[in-house]
Image: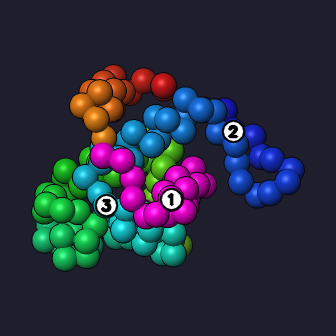
């Protein structure tokens, strides 16, 4: 991933391939835009995502097992959208957006708060990248 800071503002310019891969991964994940929007303000713990809590919080449309939710979150970390929260004791079970994740959420919020549903080709690309852990 190539990232460079621009001098005119504090955002990071990512390569188009990186942004496209991140957009596809974000849309294919089992999480709603509300989940990501919440992360603009605060970290979100795994316990509020997994099981019926995820549906109650409007983070998912269907209950996710803890293992399934964590697997999806780990993929979003590898893509560069999320990071694990750290406290004085070390890693926690909470997650936050990275600058790339923030850019994408803010982009979709400025476009009316919705994102296009992933196509079957998007799902295929995401599955392929996730399975083989390809950098593109």
Q: Which residue is depicted at the point 46% across and 34% down?
A: 21
Q: How far apart are marks 1 and 2 (CA)?
A: 24 Å
Q: Which residues lie in the magenta part?
A: 94-117
* Image: 136 above or below 119: above
Query: Mark 1 or mark 2, which has the lower sequence index?
Result: 2
Dividing the picture into quarters, in which one does residue 36 lie?
Answer: bottom left
**Is disc 1 in contact with disc 3, using a CB cutoff of under 8 Å?**
no
Q: Sequence order check: which comes first, mark 3 or mark 2?
A: 2
Toward the viewer: 127 or 86? 127
Identify the element where label 2 is drawn: strand
Q: Distance between the residues labelled 3 and 2?
A: 26 Å
In this rendering, would 59 be left or right of 5?
left
Residue 32 included in the magenta stretch of the image: no
Q: Quick check: marks 3 and 2 in contact, CB under 8 Å?
A: no
The residue depicted at 63 percent of the width and 33 percent of the height is 15
Of residue 70 and residue 21, the one placed in the foreground of this image is: 21
Q: Earlier in the sequence, mark 1 or mark 3?
A: 3
* x, y percent for residue 86: 50, 65
Residue 109 lies, with reference to residue 12, above or below; the image says below
Camera-nearest label, 1 or 2: 1
Give the residue at mark 2: 3
Could you tell me which secondary element the residue under label 1 belongs to?
Answer: loop
Q: Residue 32 carries which label?
A: 3
Say which quarter of the image contains residue 31.
Answer: bottom left
**At 70% across and 48% down in the image, what residue appears?**
12
Determine whether 31 is above or below 116 in the image. Answer: below
Residue 98 seen anywhere in this rendered image of the structure = no
Q: Which of marks 3 and 2 is in front?
A: 3
Which mark identifies residue 111? 1
């Amino acid at each position: 991933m190539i990232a460079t800071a621009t001098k005119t503002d504090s955002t990071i310019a990512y390569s188009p391939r990186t942004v496209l891969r991140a957009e596809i991964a974000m849309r294919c994940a089992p999480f709603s835009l509300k989940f990501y929007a919440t992360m603009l303000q605060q970290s979100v713990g795994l316990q509020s995502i997994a099981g019926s809590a995820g549906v109650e919080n409007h983070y998912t449309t269907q209950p996710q097992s803890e293992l399934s939710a964590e697997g999806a979150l780990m993929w979003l970390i590898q893509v560069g959208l999320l990071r694990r929260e750290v406290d004085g004791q070390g890693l926690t079970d909470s997650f936050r957006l990275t600058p790339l994740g923030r850019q994408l959420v803010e982009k979709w919020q400025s476009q009316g708060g919705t994102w296009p549903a992933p196509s079957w080709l998007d799902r295929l690309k995401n599955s392929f990248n996730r399975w083989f852990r390809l950098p593109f």
